[in-house]
Amino acid sequence: MKNIVLLFFMCSLSCLCQDNCGNVLYKVTGTYDIIYYTMRFSNKYSYYEETKIQKESEKIEVLKENGNVIKNVTIQKQSLKPMFFFNDRKELYFLTEYVSGKTDIVKETNIKWDWKILPDEKKIGNFTVQKATAKFRGSSFTGWFTNTIPLPYGPWKAKGLPGIILEIYDDNNLLHITAIKVSLTGENCKNPIDKMIFKNSIDIYTFLKKEKQEDVDFIKKLNAKLPKGAKKFNVNEDCDDCPKQLKLENFEEKF
Amino acid sequence: MKIIKLIFLLVVCHTVHSQTIINGTVKSAMNSIVSASIVLNDSISKTIIGYTYSNDDGTYTLTTSKKGKFSISFSSLGYKTKTISFEINNQKDLKIDAVLEEQAFEINEIIIQSEKDIKVKKDTITFKTKFFTNGTEQTVEDLLKKIPGLNIDANGTIKVGNQEIEKLMVDGDDLFERGYKILSKNMPAYPIEEVEVLKRYSNNRLLKDIEESNKVALNLKLNEKAKRIWFGNTTIGKGNDSFYELKGNLMNFGKKNKYYFLTNVNSIGYDATGDIQNLISPFRANEPGSLGDDQQVASLLSLSNTSGLNFKRSRTNFNNAEMVSLNAIFNPTEKLKIKTLGFFNWDETNFFRNSSEVFNVGNTNFTNTENFALRNTKKIGFGKLDVTYTISKTETIETITKYNDADYFANSNLLFNGNSTIENLKSNNLLFDQKINYTNKFADSKVFLITGRFISEETPQNYAINQFFYADLFSNAANANNVAQQNTNKMIFGGVNAHLLDRKNNGNLLEVQLGNEFRKDILNSNFSLFEDEDLIENPIDYQNNTSYYVSNSYLKTKYRYKINDISLSGTLNFHQLYNRLEMENSTKDGSPFFINPSVGLDWKLNEKNKIISSYSHNIKNAGILDVYENFVLTGFRSFNKGTGDFNQLNASNFLVNYQFGNWSDRFFANTFLIYNKNHDFFSSNSIITQNYVQSEKILIKDSAFLSIQSNFDYYFNVISSNLKIDVGYSKSNFKNSINNSDLREITSNSKQYGFELRSGFQGIFNYHIGTKWHTNTIKTTIENSFTNNTSFLDISLIFNDVFDVQLQTERYYFGNLENNNTYYFLDLDARYKVLKDKVTLNLSGKNLFNTQTFRNFAISDFGSSTTEYRLLPRMILVGLEVRF
């Protein structure tokens, strides 16, 4: 009898435990544009998705604190092009859009980041972050992670550090991601993705082949649309004196 | 014994290099904690030796080969971090469990970066070239191909994303405007250190982010230590008969001064002034500071009339042209920039045309035949000086001075109805144009411009014909046998404009302009009848002594309002005019006031659907060519006169453009609808006889024009080709009077439909085929119509990087010609790169079917005409292009 009561008590207590989660807003600086991504995370997953900031419907609050002017901006989420990265600690999935508008979910199994943790520290906002470097698919990356949020997540495909990565960039400056806002909410922690959509995912090499084919098809379509007299675009893939354009990820296998 | 020692040694070695496995479970009071972070620190240096995360069941494993004092931390969100110190000596494995205390989860929002940084758009992106090049780049074009995000197509058009650049500058200096290909294809790449991409570019730097601009520009920055460089190219071509071509571009660039010299000498029908047209008057439509750009002197007489030709003008242009141009930019100090441009053009062109015109109105019927051979000689000298001074970070002043002196001699041999006639037209154009522009950016998003302009232009003309066709008009001059017409056309324009642009915080734009434009036109015409050398008469009613003064004081307001994807713009323009028309015997004055409103809507419904619509109501004041009161001889058999009064013309205009999809989608459709209603309209009252036409301008009401045009694009994946379908319909009606009839209503409508199919194959071969039918109907009391067809087939053969051939064939069919109604043309262009980017061999063939003449059929509201043009014969040109 006592045991049953105890069991019941324990069960009800366990239902009181809350899921701890939050989100981070990242600013991604690529070659031309600044894009914003939001990463939702909890103990079990991280979901990194593009956020579109509508300038017109921004709400701007200007506060004065201790003589400093702080502007708080509330951002609306508007993802017209769903592009996300989902990490459930076992696999990494991402949704990509081809130049033709079609989308595919790509599954990356066994992404390994061999992080070397260095003693350097700095501050990002109120967070103390520590430096770590790794070589990933041909590029050298530097990441800054914080122990305050001890989860192995990060923006883009980065993962596996003792804390959440708040800043990451590569040596050639092709990618630079910085966190600009961190929220710990404790609500809405459920996994936002229905796992059913991962059923038709393709692997990374199939994806690369498919992407190349889509690019070729796109150029063919553009060439066919040119007006009279316009000379067509030439895409020289294997020309001798074309330089290998700096790519963020280099895949060893030739396909 | 030995074996035991070996085993012992191995065991000892193994233990010395052994790893310690640390494992355990992380728990909370009730459950195991999933994904807790476990970090192993050296207890002295605090460096992280290793780390891991707990599994689904709360267990973890860490391995290290180090020895000494360590601390291990267990953390998880919502729990207090627990740190345990321990020591590793020789243990093979250690078990360390942790029970974490719950900690109140702090709901927190931490803003790391203020939004002000995000608000500032990144409009300048800089690339350091050394990271993108490998040393094999010869020209700037090669270099730009390697910069990410830049697209260079086979013609050398440079685009950022999808948008062509406005200009290509070197150290902020631009010599070419949109003609930048001369620079990108010839300038060597080695002295360039940085490439800047400038988005939302404004020609006037102070207008950036205030005026609506989607323009993009590139700026190449030269290495500080780069010495002065010389580069350029030259093309020499020689063909059959007397066809030849010589082109040269020579550039000398240094950090402070840049020189550009270009020359073009040819007899292949090519008009080289087109190349520098964008330097003489850069395209600045509707940009602030464009006061007076639309003012030009009015000319009455012209002998070379090539309108109505719907094929390449160069096929009928028998020419012998020489053009030389020198341009320079000086930067004597950081604040001062001086640009100079000068060019000289000599051209002799010949033009041949035979025509037969049928006139059929009421009871009057006749046919006129003309055999026309025209020889045109022109000599043009032009100079421009552009000085920009940067007064401060927010103020600049710019002055542009232009000077033009041109002489034109046109001489024609005309056989009119069997009468041999010689026409002679001598014209001269003298232009002086001065513009001053002061810009002041007095606040972050507010700009104020003051523009002043003065233009003085005159084109005196002297016209003589050695025949007298107008005996019916001048009964006193029965012995006359030649005539002369002398015109003085002079224009003086002065204007001042103040322009305020205010870009509001929410993106809306307010523009206010206040100014005055003053224009004085002098039109004096003198018509004389001669018998040999003796002057017989200067007939009254054929002389003009007109001065027309128009002063326009105006206030223009414009507001552009943006909500989400809709952009609304409203314009309200107030004009107070003062007109004064001084004629031979009378003077007329008037001060009309009117308001011109317009509204525009830009609506992006969603990714696929866009609508642009606008409505405007315009009142326009009559120009000098509408108001002169007596007849002027404007051609060997036409007299024209204006109304003798000034008028305002009222017109309403409505436009809708609907776009479905984007240009790069598989399916793309675009429809235009234009409706124009002229409430007042200048038409003509004409007396048409066999030997002459007398036309006087009259003001009538209500003329309307409607046009609908649609085109559809669909890309067929199966055949890798894109199908374009084009359909259009337009209808217009107006009224005029011929031979003293009542006003007759004329309705003209035209239908066109056609399609094109173009391939996008990756291989050597590509085709582009198309055809278009055009049906035109003019209805008065009778109906006249014709159907024409134009077809083409282009074939492109790109064998490899160094050799390609382009073939173009055209077919023209005229429905109303009884015989000789179909014409074929074949052009060929082959290029062979002997030395990549240095020497190219060119073979070009034009009109290979050797079509000698081309006949065109047209209808009008009083008859029809068949015109035959003589064409440049078959031409085969071999050319060599060298870059240095």
Image (spheres, rainbow, N blue to C red):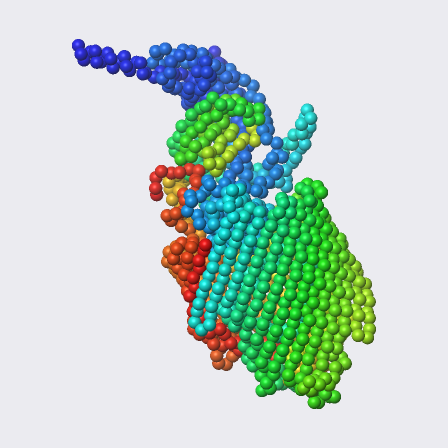
Q: Residue at x 50, y 67 (%)?
A: B266
**Which quarter of the image is occupied by the N terminus of chain B?**
top left
Residue drawn at the location 42% of the way across and 37% of the way down? A249
Q: Is residue B641 visible?
A: no
Left or right of A80, for residue B499: right
Percent position of residue B76, x then y: 49, 21
Query: Is the residue A188 above or below the residue B681 in the image?
Result: above
Residue B59, image x, y percentages = 41, 19
Tell me: residue B97, above or below residue B811.
above
Q: Is residue B167 left or right of residue B155?
A: right
Q: Where residue B554 sits in the image (x, y, percent)?
A: 76, 56
Whether A158 is drawn above or below A221: the answer is: above
Report the front residue among A235 and B704.
Answer: A235
Q: Quadrant of residue B53?
A: top left
Residue at the image point whose x is 51% and y is 56% from the top: B250
Residue A180: percent from left, percent from top? 56, 31
Q: How many marks?
A: 0
Residue at 73 percent across and 71 percent down: it is: B523
Of residues B870 and B699, the one nearer the viewer is B870
State whether residue A42 is above or below residue B120: above
The C terminus of chain B, quarter of image: bottom left
Do we see residue B375 in this rendering? Answer: yes
Q: Is residue B608 left or right of residue B568?
A: left
Front position in the image: B696 or A105: B696
Residue furthest bottom in the image: B478
